[in-house]
Amino acid sequence: MEENIGLTPNQIEFLAEDTIITIVPNFKMESLIFLSGEYGPFIPSFPVKVPLWLAVSLKKKKKCNIVPPEWMSFDYLEQQYIQENRVTDGFVDLPDNFIEISTMLLSSCPEDINDVNKIRSLIEDILNRRQSKLNNSLMNHLQSLKDNEPISTMEFKNFSMMEINRVRSSFVSGINHLYKIQSLDNNDNNSNNNNNNINRTQSNSQTASRSIYSNTINFSK
Amino acid sequence: MMDNEYNTQLDNDENNLLNKLKTIWINEKFAPNLLDYQNEIISNVMEKIEEKEALCTEGIQNKSHQFTADIYEMEIERLKYIVKCYLRLRIKKIDQFYTSVLKESQSNTELLSQHELKYTERYKSYMDEYFKKTILSSLHKDHSTMSPDHYLEPQLNTWVFCKPKENLGEYLIDEDTIDFKKTSIYFVKYRPIKDLVQAGRMDLI
Amino acid sequence: MSYLNIDDILAEEQKLSCKFLYNAYNLGQLEEGSADTDIEKGTKIDLPYWLAYVLAKKGLVSAEMPTPYQQDFKDKLIADPNVISMRSHQYYDKIGTMLSSFFSDRSLNLLLFRVFRDRFLKIYNQSLNLRETDITKIVGNMTRLERNIFENGYRSSIDYDKWRNRKGEKIERNPNIIFPVASRSSSVNNSINSNNINSSSTQSSSSSTQSSQPKKDTVLKKRKRIFDDES
């Protein structure tokens, strides 16, 4: 049936590798012009911004040290963890590509990170907490599905492609089958199910927005 | 505070060619149907790749530029990887849905690249030939042609995760009014948002 | 339903007990162990769904809901959807939706929705959280569709863990092997062998699917003529 619906974690990591990060090079080189912009010039001991893939590759060749992003600090992450626990029905806004970047940095330049072991376990805790929250909210959504109501759209804030990808293929194929059961039933009852193209609603539409956004939370720091 | 810096960095990047290339790959990946071929982006990227490859060959002749050339080589490989993923995904969909793709390409000239169009036509003729030789020719004449429902069609009623590029306002999806906001991610049926994805107003993730 | 999908084709092998409403000449071979060349009006024969569907739509036979979709089994299922093993009902959900629309049985549809929702909840959760357990037994109690979902979730979750632990760099053996080939083929055999009509139909379903599907159309066509002549 649907095989391999998602991307592999390595592909998502690949996408995150274009994130800009600061390095301190130990060599001299003129600026590089990439598709995403200009980087450099490279002067020993002068911090410079480059894409993460280049940073990791230079690090491997011992050509630079990586300056971890500010959020890779114990204080910041501890704050995030506390807030992640405080909010039960939503997710805290983490930096873009948080999982990919932190995982890559922890494995490629642990010596450049302060409190590296504390940070490692803190990130593990944050991710586990988020994972179980995401799981719970998807399970709650499933449990709330009624055979006589269309499967409602879900709205989320602040969670990442990596987190989606882990649950994507099983969740999507299950929901697709539930939808199939419903739509066969609706066809029998002459419902206008096939006619479900999008309709722009008037701004004064009185359609009551049902409270399906139980998973929404706009968490402001 | 600090992630603001990162966000603005990304916002500035939003329209650069690299991000456009990544976006069309990911959209193609998660859309159940074949999306329009992004000729402009692909040919721009291919042009850049060729330019850079030429530069790299020059660099190899000059020993002092070897290091820089190696780095450009890495960038080229990354770009090629995305282009290949994109094109292969499309070929995979074309193989699956060749009849409906050909039909759609008659009214929508953006759907396929020239190469893809040729490929699809040839693929169809091979498949027709194959079915004819292996099965259809030995059946009664009432059954010796394929009927439309014998071909695979994309499952437009599949569910997808998506993220609006801008605040899109309210849309009616089934019986729910959804206010599509830039800051949110939605888990929604693909069919109603298909046109938004094709128009580049909504990204699949 | 997709024409060339092997699971869809196998799902449609589900037998339905059908009563012939007319005499059917030269169709005696459909009746197991019968020496007659014809089928008499009123005879009851088990036919696969794909055949029963066409004949019933034409008003030539009346079909009965198969036992696993009758009240007894449904009661057991709804009492606790997660307890029942689907080992011998590999296509319960798939053919179930077809049957509910064929018989316009709304209650079956509701049941399928609830049962699948509850089983899916468990399967989804297991697929993401089970590690280093012997999953063959759990998987054996699922339908084909459920197993697919489980397999999808299990694989993405393992991929994720491997990536987090930076094991992705090494090439490893194909994770598909976690699902033993033996259990797959036995499930297929189940659905084909249970209640054979006769040897010829078994042959057609166990021979390559590519050819079995068009074949069944010709057979249908011939049968239709026989009935046409008669009426």
Image (cartoon, coloured by chain):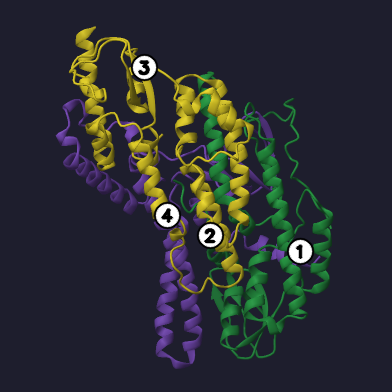
Chain colours: A green, B purple, C yellow
Q: Quadrant of the N terminus of chain A?
A: top left
Q: Position of residue B26 (x, y in %)?
A: 52, 55
Q: Which mark is residue B4?
A: 1
Q: Position of residue B123 (x, y in %)?
A: 27, 48
User: Of label 1 and label 2, which has the lower sequence position?
Assistant: 1
Q: Is residue C108 left or right of residue C210?
A: right
Q: Position of residue B15 (x, y in %)?
A: 59, 59
Amino acid of disc 3: Lys
Tell us which disc is closer to us: 1 or 4: 4
* Chain ID, mark 2: B
- Report the residue marked by disc 2: B22
Q: Which mark is residue A76?
A: none
Q: Which mark is residue B89?
A: 4
Q: Separation of disc 3 and disc 2 at Cα?
A: 50 Å
State the SS at label 2.
Answer: helix
- Assess disc 3: are there few (<14), some (14-19) or many (≥20) residues with their C-alpha within 10 Å of its C-alpha: few
Q: Separation of disc 4 and disc 3 at Cα?
A: 41 Å
Q: Is residue A66 above or below residue C77?
A: below
